[in-house]
Amino acid sequence: MNNLYEKTKFGLNIHFYTGRTILEVHRIIPLIANKVLVISEKSNDSWYDEKYNNLIDYFETNNYEIECLRLLENYNSDIIEKRYYDLINNHKYVDYVKNIVHLLKQYNNTEIEPEC
């Protein structure tokens, strides 16, 4: 699979389902981790959309062909490199777990402490 990533310039994330959509981070993170430009539709999950806003280019219109051409015309390997390091340094899984534990603690009003 890594050989495929090495030959890939950009990855498209188009939602399979209509209606309530999620940001498919399980597909997006490996692309960014392999220094691939990611272009995605926005999801109905504004928290994830905002969290990954600096790592992903979102479609601004439904004219995907024009949007892809516009983004590729402005393709810059420095931007891709910056996004890679941003992912590595600022999007650690343990931080997400701590956020979830904190939210659950608030929701349940319990004294659970994260062990991370």
Image (cartoon, grey):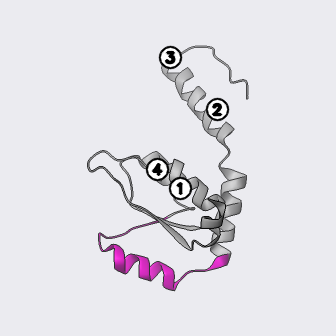
| Residue type, numbered disc 4 | Glu
Mark 4 vs mark 2: give the one in front.
4
| Residue type, numbered disc 3 | Asn
| Residue type, numbered disc 2 | Lys
Mark 1 vs mark 3: give the one in front.
1
Q: Residues within 10 Å of mark 2 (few under 14, many from 20)?
A: some
Mark 2 or mark 1, which is nearer the start of the sequence?
A: 1
Residue 27 is situated, as x and y percent measured from the top left of the image, at 51, 53
Label 1 to label 2: alpha-carbon separation:
22 Å
> Which of the 4 quarters of the picture holds residue 60?
bottom left
Quick one: quadrant of the N terminus?
A: bottom right
Q: In the figure, is residue 4 to the left or right of 68?
A: right
Mark 2 vs mark 3: give the one in front.
2
Q: Do residues under tags 4 and 2 come within 8 Å of each other at their CB atoms?
A: no
> Which of the 4 quarters of the picture holds residue 116?
top right
Residue 22 is situated, as x and y percent measured from the top left of the image, at 40, 46
Mark 2 lies on residue: 98
Label 4 to label 2: alpha-carbon separation:
21 Å
Q: Residue at x 42, y 49 (%)?
A: 46
Q: Which residues are magenta?
A: 57-77
Label 1 to label 3: alpha-carbon separation:
32 Å
Mark 4 lies on residue: 24
Residue 8 is situated, as x and y percent measured from the top left of the image, at 57, 71
Label 2 to label 3: alpha-carbon separation:
15 Å
Q: Residue at x 29, y 69 (%)?
A: 62
Q: Is residue 108 above or below residue 71?
A: above
Which disc number belongs to residue 108?
3
Q: Do residues under tags 1 and 4 come within 8 Å of each other at their CB atoms?
A: yes
Q: Residue at x 36, y 80 (%)?
A: 66
